Amino acid sequence: MGQSWALGNLCIAHVKECIQKTQSLKYAEEVYHNGTLVIKAFSSGLEIGASNWVINGPKRNFTWLSSSIFASRHAMGFDYNSLQGNGVILFSDFSSMCGNVSVGINAYRSMNQIRPKVNSPTGSDFSTLRDGNNSKEDFIKSVTDTGENTVEIDKLAFICSCAIDSVREGGSVLIPIGRLGIILQLLEQISISLESSNLNVPMFIISDVAEEILSLMNVVPEWLCEQRQQKLYSGEALFGHVKLIKEKKLHLFHTIHSPNLLAIWKEPCIVFSPHWSLRQGPAIHLLRRWSADKRCLLVLEQGVDADIALLPFKPIAMKVLQCSFLSGIEMQKIQPLLEILRPKLILFPEDLMAHMITSHTGSSVYFGYSENETICVPRSRDEFEVDLATDLVFQLQPRRIKQENAAIARLKGKYHVHHGRHLLISENEPVNHSQSRLLLQWGSLDLTLLLLALREKGINGSIDNDGMGEHNSCFLRIYEPKKALIETTGTLTVVSAVDETLASIIFQTICSVLDAI
């Protein structure tokens, strides 16, 4: 691979090899990594296929919470119910750091902004609701039903009105926005506006992946919102672009130099070209053609520095409209959402910790993280469950522990991990219980109990409290019927006796005092 990089070109074979390692998932489909981790994807609501991830391991359940939207007009909404009950949440939605949502139109000399008037609840509103007698369902509704769709509809309507005004004046519209859901909704609304205004203006999507992406919309209905899914059940097209293509009002082309495109090209027109950087693709050629025309309109997504992006095309006479679409969880909703999910540990960006509206009062523990830093997260549990094969269950010979209300047994098998389950399966060799095997004892040896047990068998002795050894050892000295010495430490017991019969009796007595299997 080094040679291909040195030549400035990536080898096609290496690209195909990397693509083959990519695995596509269905909604909530379980996949397994190394047999141990169970990975599932649930909709985040941001885009079609945009996901929050649940990773279940043997000792911890983990949620990766990415940029999410509670309600969407094209994608399946934020599925927060599937994220409940996990021990750890990695919060990685940084959209609230980008400022307020706004729409503005700029002609490079004047700026007019339109801010939809939607009363969004504040952090104190959520706190008041949560502290009241309202049910959990009412609380969840207050978090999710806050007019997000209304704000987005108003912004899309404003973009459409600006586009219609431009084409009425004879200008063309260039929309280099990369978010698929926004493009699909703009196509629907602009086509309706054109029809109601009796304007016969062609629309183009110029992209080398346009056909593949639009055809994908018909095979992933589980990632679409409920309104779109209902269209599927009734036999209607999921999105309006299907009808527009059939009626030849929308045209798809891979490149701007396509002969078929040049044959039907007509201005004014509306062009979608998803190259937001304005440094590649057909947007470069179209900007050079239209930048000096004050009737034309350029629609950019906020986050792009318009001054830098348009620097190669100055002087600019065309209108520039910058839009900011909802791209994540609003700041005032973060804490109520985390209260709903109730994780034990929350990994939260350090930059956002200071912007939290109210201090958290729940049982969750927050850990701040920063870029390129490693943090240590405490384990939630040390043990994990293992399933036993049926034949191993019948081989168990449990023995009750004296000092605890439990039983323990020995068994022999093979440890196996499959699809996130830990299994102990039997070996091929049959187990012979009649065959003698060495007992396993555990626990500390109580010399007082041992001496009482020995006296029941006619063996007398005394505990030597003054004879502590160098390893904190204790001694039990036997003087009847014959002499012997028992030395015990925290991990070792040594029996010293001249008579083998006496040594055997002492050993059996020690085993009866200790727990063993």
Image (cartoon, helix red, strand yellow):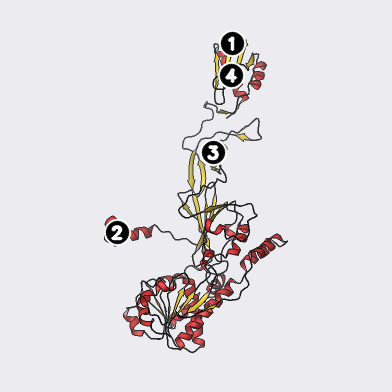
Residue annotated with mark 2:
5
Q: CA distance from mark 4 to mark 3?
A: 45 Å
Q: Point out residue 473 in the picture as x, y percentages from the top left corner.
A: 57, 21
Residue annotated with mark 1:
483
Mark with earlier residue (1, 2)? 2
The amino acid on which the numbered mark 2 sits, given as a three-letter code, is Trp
Q: Closer to the camera: disc 3 or disc 2? A: 2
Tell me whether circle 1 and circle 4 mark residues in contact (CB < 8 Å). Answer: no
Q: Closer to the camera: disc 3 or disc 1? A: 1
Q: Closer to the camera: disc 1 or disc 2? A: 2
320 and 173: which is toward the camera: 320
Determine the image quadrant of residue 293. Answer: bottom left
The amino acid on which the numbered mark 4 sits, given as a three-letter code, is Met
In which quadrant will I find the C terminus? top right
Horizontal relation, residue 290 to residue 228: left or right = left
Mark with earlier residue (1, 4)? 4
The amino acid on which the numbered mark 1 sits, given as a three-letter code, is Lys
Residue annotated with mark 4:
468
